[in-house]
Image (spheres, rainbow, N blue to C red):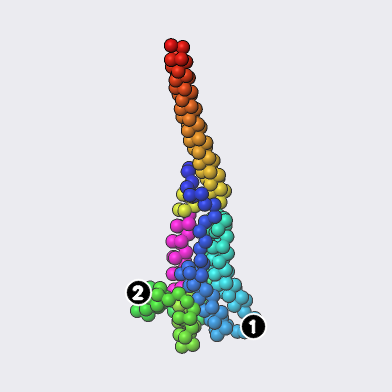
Amino acid sequence: MKYNTNGKVLKKAVVWKDLYFYRKSDTLYQLTVEFCKRFFPAHGDRTVDQMVQAARSGKQNIVEGSEDGLTSSEMELKLLNVARGSLQELRSDYHDYLNTHHLMLWEANSERQKKLRSFCRNHNDYGDYEPLLSKMDDEEMANMALTLCHQTDRMMCAYIAKLEETFVKEGGIKERMHAARTGYRKEQDAYMQQLETENAALHREVEALRAEVAKLREEIDAERRG
């Protein structure tokens, strides 16, 4: 398999703060903190730590994966999948909350779920959600969090698929380093070959000039003797 790196070893840096799925994951984290503060007891419920840590792990592994992606595609893919796993765990916790508190999981085709889905699709940052939370009950907040979980996961799946395709085409850092070294050697070999060709041509030209000079000398000597 050939890897084309154009001489570059490190990948182009990704600004993780600009990734829509990171921004949604950060919103999920802050929303989850607020949800737990409002609807769980202040002490004694391990679910709080579990949900907050799962939400934090989701966003933090996106950050670490993007940073590590400069040098290791394998680590980037691994950490992004860890982030997905954490957010899936968070999604399960919200489902459990709805079930144990006898609240509704809004049907996909219901009007309120359609409106919620549209809002979450078009808003990524917590600042867009914060003014609404004080007016929402636990069922509404849980369904909002679940919608964000689903959308974030779909976006991450698409992003990971793109990374995997790039990895197959370009390889990891070892393959890119090998390709860069191989490309450099090929350039040097081609340059040396060019110099050798030019040197041989110059050598032939010099020999031709020497022969011409020798012939002229013979003609001059013949004229002198004549």
Residue 109, picture quadrant: bottom left
Residue 25 position (above or below residue 8): below
Q: Is residue 137 visible?
A: no
**Point 43% across, 15% down: residue:** 223
| Image height of 197 relative to 19, above or below | above
Foreground residue among 28 and 200: 200
Please state the horizontal and vertical placement of residue 144, each as a whole percent of the image.
Answer: 45, 77
Q: Main secondary structure of the magenta part?
A: helix
Residue with the mark numbered 2: 109
- Mark 2, other Cα within 10 Å: few <14 / some 14–19 / many ≥20: few
| Dot 2 or dot 1, earlier in sequence | 1
Task: Label 2, secondary structure: give it.
Answer: loop
Q: In front: 33, or 8?
A: 8
Magenta-colored span: 147-164
Q: Tell me if I can see residue 11 in this picture.
A: yes
Residue pointed to by mark 1: 43
Q: Are marks 2 and 1 in contact (CB under 8 Å)?
A: no
